[in-house]
Amino acid sequence: MNAVILLFPGTNRERDMAIALEKATGRKPAILFHQETALPPGTDLVVLPGGFSHGDYLRCGAMAARSPIMPAVQDFAARGGHILGVCNGFQILAEAGLLPGALLRNASLRFLSMDCHLRVERTDTPFTSRWQQGEVFRAPMAHGDGNYFADDATLERLEKDGRVAFRYVTPGGEVTEAANRNGARNNIAGIVSENRRILGMMPHPEDLVDPLMGGTDGLPLFESIADTFAAA
C-alpha cells in the first residue's frame, strides 16, 4: 500500500501519522509538500494530518484547501481514491468541498486538549472494518475548531445514508450533551463521503497505536486501511 501524507505550513502531526501507518502496513508513507502539483504514481491513500495549516488564518483549512496539490487530491477523489483527514485534515477536506459541512469554533470558545470516547457507527468502510458495530474507543482531541456543523437538510441526508462514522459518546456508549465537548451537531466526530472512501474526523487515532503511547485504541483504523488494500 502506497500512502502519501500531505505537509502544509503549520502541519505538526505528520510524524505521528507516519508511525501509525507504518505500524499497520509495514511500509513507510511518503511525505509530500503542499506546493507539489501531482501525487506520486501508484498512490493508494492520501492522508491530511492535523496541525495548524497556514496558522489557521482566515478559517481553519481554508488556505490549505487552495494549495497547489489540492487539484490533484480532488482528481484522486473523483477517481475513487481513498483519503483520510484528521483534525486539521478534516477541516481542509470540508473547505475543499470533499466532505459536506463545516468545522466551527468549539461551543466553549476554548481549545480542547483531552481524551474523548467515540462510538463506531458503521463497520462497512475501509476505515472501520476492524471494529464491531457500536464499539466505543478512546481518542485524544486537540482542537479549537472541531464543532461539526451542517444545515438540517445535509444532516438529515448524512444520517439517512449512514455516513456518520464516529459519534462522541460516554465511555458506556451513550450519546449525551456532556460527551459532546465541542458542541458538534448530533455528536458527530467523523463522517465519510458518499462512496465511503473519504473519511474526515476530529479526534486523533494516530496518537494511540502503541502501548508506549498509552494504548492502542486507534490502531484498528489503520489496520482497517491495511486490510482494505491487502484484499484489493
Image (cartoon, helix red, strand yellow):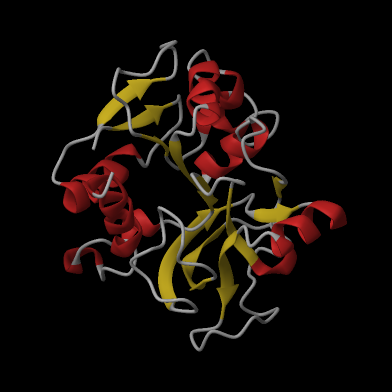
Quadrant showing the C terminus: top left
How far across and down, in percent of the image, does residue 54 sit? 54, 26
How far across and down, in percent of the image, does residue 68 sit? 51, 12
How far across and down, in percent of the image, does residue 122 sit? 51, 67
Residue 160 falls left or right of residue 65? right
Q: Tell me what residue is drawn at x 65 percent, y 58 percent.
A: 110
Of residues 190 and 181, the one nearer the viewer is 190
Of residues 158 and 139, the one nearer the viewer is 158
How far across and down, in percent of the image, does residue 153 sit? 85, 54
Of residues 203 and 75, the one nearer the viewer is 75
Q: Tell me what residue is drawn at x 34 percent, y 22 percent.
A: 32
Q: In the picture, residue 63 is in which quadrant? A: top right
Q: In the picture, residue 48 is in which quadrant? A: top left
Quadrant showing the N terminus: top left
Residue 77 falls left or right of residue 46? right
Q: Residue furthest front?
A: 232
Of residues 63 and 223, the one nearer the viewer is 223
Image: 221 above or below 134: above
Q: Residue furthest left?
A: 26
Image: 220 above or below 76: below
Q: Tell me what residue is drawn at x 67 percent, y 82 percent.
A: 176
Q: Is residue 94 visible to the viewer in this orientation of the structure?
A: yes
Q: Residue furthest right?
A: 152
Q: Is residue 184 visible to the viewer in this orientation of the structure?
A: no
Image: 173 above or below 100: below
Q: In the picture, residue 224 is in which quadrant? A: bottom left
